[in-house]
Amino acid sequence: MAKCSVEILRMETTRTIDGRNRANVWIGKRAGVNIGAPADSGAPIYIPVGSGNAAIVGMHIAGFLAAPFDETWFHAVGDIEAQLGVTVAF
């Protein structure tokens, strides 16, 4: 079952993940709720929009250092599009 309503906490212009500096990493959380698990990289990050709809805002790249696995680090859709030279269709 998908978990929505990730609270976007902040954006870090540089964050070191697995020994590599990554640009424009967003930090999101849903306090006390397991929103994923290790090896979930590539999963969509989305927020509720209106009544019963959702909008994808990014792609999970890391996080979940320890239980309850309620934090995600992700790249925003616009950054992914710019890096890959593609357009994400909704």
Image (cartoon, rainbow, N blue to C red):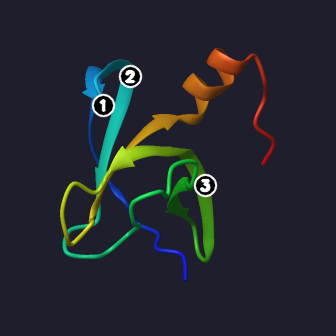
* Label 2 Cα neighbours within 10 Å, binned few <14 / some 14-19 / many ≥20: some
Q: Which of 44 and 64 is in front in this view?
A: 64
Q: Position of residue 60 (x, y in %)?
A: 48, 47
* Dot 1 and dot 3 residues touching (CB under 8 Å): no
* Label 1 Cα neighbours within 10 Å, binned few <14 / some 14-19 / many ≥20: few
- The secondary structure type at the circle numbered 3 is strand
Residue drawn at (32%, 74%), measured in percent from left and top?
A: 34
Q: Nearer the viewer, mark 2 or mark 3?
A: 2
What amino acid is found at the position of numbered circle 3 in the picture? Ala
Q: Earlier in the sequence, mark 1 or mark 2?
A: 1
State whether residue 15 is above or below residue 56.
Answer: above
Most extreme residue toward the bottom is 1
What amino acid is found at the position of numbered circle 2 in the picture? Asn
State whether residue 41 is above or below residue 6.
Answer: above
Residue drawn at (53%, 57%), measured in percent from left and top?
A: 46
Q: Which residue does the numbered mark 1 point to in the structure image? A: 17
Real-space Cα separation, disc 1 to disc 3, in angstroms: 26 Å
Q: Which residue does the numbered mark 2 point to in the structure image? A: 24
Q: Position of residue 12 (x, y in %)?
A: 26, 25
| Residue 62, image quadrant | top left
State whether residue 75 is above or below residue 14.
Answer: below
- The secondary structure type at the circle numbered 1 is strand
Q: Which residue does the numbered mark 3 point to in the structure image? A: 55
Q: Looking at the rendered structure, which numbered label has been put on residue 76? A: none
Q: Where is residue 6 in the image (x, y as percent from the top left)?
A: 37, 60
Q: Which of marks 2 and 3 is nearer the N terminus?
A: 2
* 47 displayed left or right of 82: left
Residue drawn at (57%, 67%), measured in percent from left and top?
A: 50
Quadrant showing the N terminus: bottom right
Q: Tally the marks.
A: 3
Most extreme residue toward the front is 19
State whether residue 38 is above or below residue 68.
Answer: above
